[in-house]
Amino acid sequence: MSSPKHEKGLARVRYTAVFICLAAAFAVLTVWNINTGSVHISVGRIARIIFLRAGDETEIGIVWKLRLPRIIAAAVLGGGLALSGFLMQTFFGNPIAGPFVLGISSGSKLFVAIVMIVVLRFVNYVTSWMMVVAAFAGALIAMGFVLLAARSIKQMSMLLVAGIMISYICSAITEFLITFAKDSDIVNLHGWSQGRFSGTTWADVRFFVIVILVCFALVFLMSKPIGAYQMGESYAQSMGVNVRRFRVILILMSSLIAGCVTAFAGPISFVGIAVPHLIKMLLKSAKPILVIPASFLGGGVFCLLCDYIARTAFAPVELSISTVTALFGAPVVIAMLIRRHGQKS
């Protein structure tokens, strides 16, 4: 039998290996995404453009105005989705909880649709703040309905059904609004609702990077109370955690992150469920101090890979990002449900 000290040593090696692999995958996918497109730019020229701002003016424009903002959006917003999913799974004690499955993204989509269709008739333009506030409000309201359902529903499968029903209701109201929208608004909303990282500007990047990274830092600082909460509310209270206030913070943080992602990239499916689950499998641990940064990095890697496939699989036609994330994420969720059912039977 191996000693506890030996097991701890093996665990540290595994944790280090997982983070190194994620960091390496992130670096490779970043270079790969910058390098690939309708205009091929060599790695050497990319380095000169990024670090020296030297080279062909067209290539500088492609890298700085198109590809870098898109890559940052995929990395940061993808990480935010995974983090939001982890917080929801912690809150509900449910591995299939996530912003897309529970209807949180659909709530955000509804309120953003209201801004893009209704509010634009009375104002000249919509700011990033307005989009994020609308998406946050929609996420909170949808989360409120999920919480009401969760008080009466204890079964994991039925909670999933409740989330899907909330998603359908929000989608139905959104489609009702679209019926009376202008053609230009319909085109804009349709493109946004499919989920995409393209069209991201540096103004968008500055805004969502601040919001998401501040939320990430706050969540990481909450690693210890999150770990206590995972052991049960009674244990968390015995460790000095104010459970009622803590639960409110979890709701607000997860809704703000999900709302911010939806405002800038549209509703993106399955990242919030699949990535935290895969990270826990790789780490063989649910410790928040490990899972939080690993999920954030893993979400970025997952979305960078999916965005690359969306851009290149049928070029010049570009797939929506949700199409690709669902293709890879849904099987993970199905496997998770089958595994949990097998363990219970």
Image (spheres, rainbow, N blue to C red):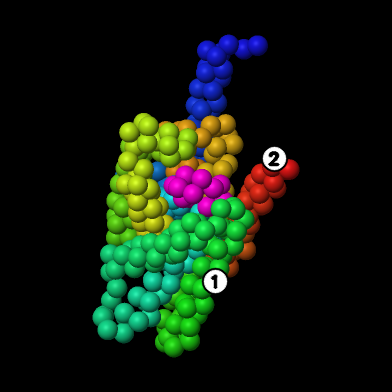
Q: Which residue is pictured at 56% across the width and 53% down the height?
A: 154
The vertical placement of 158 against 343, above or below, is below
- Cα distance in 3D space between marks 1 and 2: 31 Å
Q: What element carries label 1?
A: helix
The vertical placement of 234 against 40, above or below, is above
Quadrant location, the N terminus: top right
User: Dot 2 corresponds to which residue?
Assistant: 343
Residue 317 at x, y = what percent? 58, 68
Instruction: Report the magenta residues as a range.
Output: 85-97
Residue 56 at x, y = what percent? 38, 55
Left or right: where does residue 271 sit relative to residue 143? right
Q: Please name whichever residue, 63 or 299, is drawn nearer the observer in this view of the structure.
A: 299
Is residue 45 at least partly visible in the picture? no
Q: Which amino acid does label 2 sit on?
A: Gln
Q: Which residue is pictured at 43% across the width and 33% down the height?
A: 235
Q: What element carries label 2?
A: helix
Q: Which residue is pictured at 31% across the width and 65% down the height?
A: 133
Residue 324 at x, y = what percent? 59, 58
Residue 149 at x, y = what percent? 50, 61
Give residue 131's quadrant in the image.
Answer: bottom left
Left or right: where does residue 43 sit relative to residue 202? right
Give the label on residue 168, or none: 1
Q: Please name whichever residue, 121 or 239, is drawn nearer the observer in this view of the structure.
A: 239
Decide: few, some or many residues near mark 2? Use Cα within 10 Å; few <14, some 14-19, many ≥20: few
Instruction: Find out whether residue 95 is within the magenta segment.
Output: yes
